[in-house]
Image (cartoon, rainbow, N blue to C red):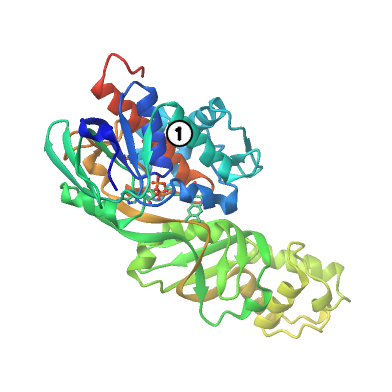
Amino acid sequence: MELPLFFNQQVDLTVVGGGPAGFMAAITAAQSGVASVVLLESNAKTLEKVRISGGGRCNVTHACWDPGELVTNYPRGRLALMSAFSRFAAGDAVNWFEDKGLRLIAEQDGRIFPVSNSSSDVVTCLRNAAKASGVHFLTKQAVNRVDSMQKNRFFISSKGSKPFESKKVLLATGSHSSGRKIAQALGHSIVNPVPSLFSLKLDSFSLSICSGVALDNVKITLFTDDKSFQEIGRVLITHQGLSGPAVLRLTAFAARHLSKLNYKARLSVNWIDSNYDSARSQLNNFRYTSSRSRLVNSNPFSKFPKRFWLEIIKQAKVDPYIRWAELSSVNEKRLLNILISNSYNVFGKGPYGEEFVTAGGVRLDEINMTTMESLVVPGLYFAGELLDIDGITGGFNFQHCWSSGWLAGKAIANSLNPYLSEN
Ligand SMILES: Cc1cc2nc3c(=O)[nH]c(=O)nc-3n(C[C@H](O)[C@H](O)[C@H](O)COP(=O)(O)OP(=O)(O)OC[C@H]3O[C@@H](n4cnc5c(N)ncnc54)[C@H](O)[C@@H]3O)c2cc1C
């Protein structure tokens, strides 16, 4: 494909990758006075991940307004993001979209979505903002090489078109390997990419019959070779193991350890997030008030659906048809052990939730995190998932795309035209 005529001149900024990070950077640079901004996307359509995100609703960001608190949601990149979020955080992202006419709403758990609940409104908002600010975006342009000649002089080569010249380059290729290869060829180091945010497959998982049951306030502890990880929250029982927000958070923080162990580890589940003594007194109080009821028909934990409670009794090898008054101390102990330390062997990673990301990417100590400029190649910038940054579910992954893209766009404008761009 031949590139448009303006490619015969030197372009000010070339953005490689038409995802959220690339769009935010391109729009910000163009709006801050960069005259020619070109965005190249390898697919036939830009912003495809935004379109499929959040189950088609797009969880744009999270109602977490304090940068210090916001960074705690990033298993990787936490420290580096502090300076980025102190300049552009969740509140700035909300204002940015609302300024462009996209109305957003926060749900009770803090996740922020478009009021319309439609991810295509976010896509349209970004595309319209790019057009209005004069960004030229071209699809089916897979960039395969970037050569750095001298300060402010790069040559960009993409499949099937003539190389052209650009003063600045921003790489925002997400988890795609081609971006990492380009960065490596330019002298950057890569932290080995591994998946994050997945469910767990458990060996001999006797609760699969309860698939679909979701329980709140479950404490899960994962033991790997040298470290343990713990989360408390909502857990979803699946055919092969466990998923749900608490499990996805756990696997995000343990992503590197689990990958090293080929997804083999031990998991302990405390279904009632309680210690032995308080669980025992809860059981005894219940036994006192419901002594004549059969175990199967009455359970002390209101959050347990009947079929789940029955499986717990069976796992403890207790007869479900005995009355509470007949529960021996041996059986009580077995029941308590299953309730507070139900142990499983993890044997693999299951399917992803609604969202998944790659942990790893371009090393952060080779980047100036206030400008997103490379410390290896001046004039080269990075944004988004290509970096060794990833967040847990809840809108945090898009947030660091908005922040890093905005910072890069501002810094590029500032360096090309320090008098035009306002800070
Ligand atoms: C199913 C799913 C749902 C998700 N839902 C959410 C959510 O609701 N909230 C949230 O915060 N996060 C969500 N995420 C994570 C989020 O989508 C990513 O973190 C985010 O898209 C990363 O943005 P990016 O711009 O860095 O990369 P991408 O969105 O991956 O964009 C990079 C773009 O670069 C293009 N590209 C790659 N290589 C080249 C090349 N050589 N030349 C030209 N173009 C290239 C790619 O085709 C792509 O369009 C979800 C992820 C998935 C998979």
Depth check: 165 or 264 in front? 165
Q: Quadrant of residue 422?
A: top left
Q: Quadrant of the C terminus?
A: top left
Left of 147 or right of it: where is 136? right
Identified by mark 1, the residue type is: Pro
Crowdedness near tag 1: few (<14), some (14–19) or many (≥20) residues, C-alpha within 10 Å: some
Ligand 1 within 8 angstroms of badge 1 C-beta: no
* Residue 183: x %, y % from top left: 22, 48
Q: Which residue is mark 1?
A: 67
Q: Secondary structure at mark 1?
A: helix
Left of 314 or right of it: where is 47? left
Considering every residue shown, the one lying at the far right of the view is 292
Left of 356 or right of it: where is 311? right
How many discs appear? 1
Depth check: 133 or 330 in front? 133
Depth check: 273 or 72 in front? 72
Up-down: is 235 above or below 2?
Answer: below
In percent of the image, x 45 and y 33: which residue is there? 67
Left of 199 or right of it: where is 259? left
Is residue 203 in view?
yes
* Residue 274: x %, y % from top left: 63, 61
In percent of the image, x 38 and y 56: which residue is there? 358
Is residue 189 in view?
no
* Residue 380: x %, y % from top left: 22, 37
